[in-house]
Amino acid sequence: MPQGTLFVMTGASGVGKGTLRARLLERVKLYYSISMTTRAPRPGERHGVDYWFVDRARFEAAVERGELLEYAEYVGNYYGTPRAPVERHLARGEDVLLEIEVEGAKQVKERAPRLGIPAVFIFIVPPSLSELRRRLLLRSGDGDPAKLKEIAARLARAEREIREAGGVGFDYVVTNDVLESATVDLERIVRAERLKTHRRGEALLAALSRDPELEAELDEMERWLVERGRTGN
Ligand code: 5GP
C-alpha cells in the first residue's frame, strides 16, 4: 500500500485557514493532525479537538524527546505537531492535513524528504493586506489595546511571510477571497495529488490486466470479423 500524502496548509493568521480546513474536511477524507500549544483555549475550544493545550514545561519536554515533527513560537506561544499520529496515519496509506504557520512549514519542507514523507505545501493568502487587517479587527471584536497590539504583530508577520513565500518552495498558492472557490481549489489540489503516479501503482496494474472471459469473446469476435472480411458478407 502506498504511503499517504502529507498536506501542509499554511498562511497568515486571520486568512481563514481554520474555516477552509473545516470545509475541506467535509469534502475529502483526510486525517487532521491536532497540534500541541501553550496558548490558552479560546471560548468554545476543546482539549484534544482544537488543540492539545499544555503548559510550557510539557511542551519543552515534548521538544526534547523529539516527539514533534515541527514546532514554532508564534506571538508568544509555542505550537507544534505531534509526530507519532502523523506517521501512523501516513503508514496506513491515509492522507494527513497539517494547518500550521510558515516557520513550521519550512521545517517540514526540510525534514519530509529525509523521513521519506511525500508532502505537498499549500500557501493560503488574503486578497490583500487591508482585507486581512479588516478580518483580524472584526475577529477581535473590541478595542482592547493589548489585542490591537497583537493584531499589529500578526499583520507584520503576515506581510513578511507573504514576501518570503517565493523562497519557501510552496507547491500551491490559494487566495481566500470567495470562501467557496478557495475550498474548491483546495479540494482539487488534494484530488489531483491522489492521481500522481506514485499513488497509482494499483491503477497501472489494473490497466495491464486481462479478463479471460472477455478475451475469449474478443477472440470469437476477431474470428468473425476475419471471416466476414474474407467472404464479404
Ligand atoms: P491560533 O492561535 O490563531 O490558533 O494559531 C496561531 C497560528 O499558529 C496559526 O497560524 C496556526 O496555523 C498556527 N499553528 C497551529 N498549530 C500549529 C503547529 O502545530 N505548528 C505550527 N508551526 N503552527 C501552528
Image (cartoon, rainbow, N blue to C red):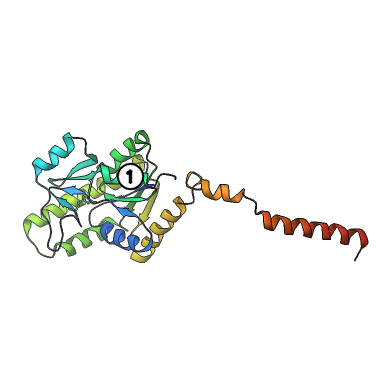
Mark yes or no: residue 40 visible: yes
Q: Is residue 196 left or right of residue 89?
A: right
Between 220 and 87, the one nearer to me in the picture: 220
Total marks placed: 1
> Could you tell me which residue is drawn at 54 percent across and 50 percent down?
203
Q: Secondary structure at mark 1?
A: helix
> Could you tell me which residue is drawn at 87 percent across and 59 percent down?
227
Q: Position of residue 16 (x, y in %)?
A: 27, 59
Asked if 93 appears above or below 61 in the picture, the reply is: below
Local crowd size for mark 1, using a 10 Å CA cut-off: few (<14), some (14–19), many (≥20): some
Name which quarter of the figure residue 146 lies in: bottom left
Between 23 and 96, the one nearer to me in the picture: 96
Between 59 and 184, the one nearer to me in the picture: 59
**Amino acid, disc 1:** Ala
Residue sitting farthest toward the left: 145
The residue tagged 1 is 165
Q: Position of residue 148 (x, y in %)?
A: 11, 56
Q: Is residue 8 left or right of residue 1?
A: left
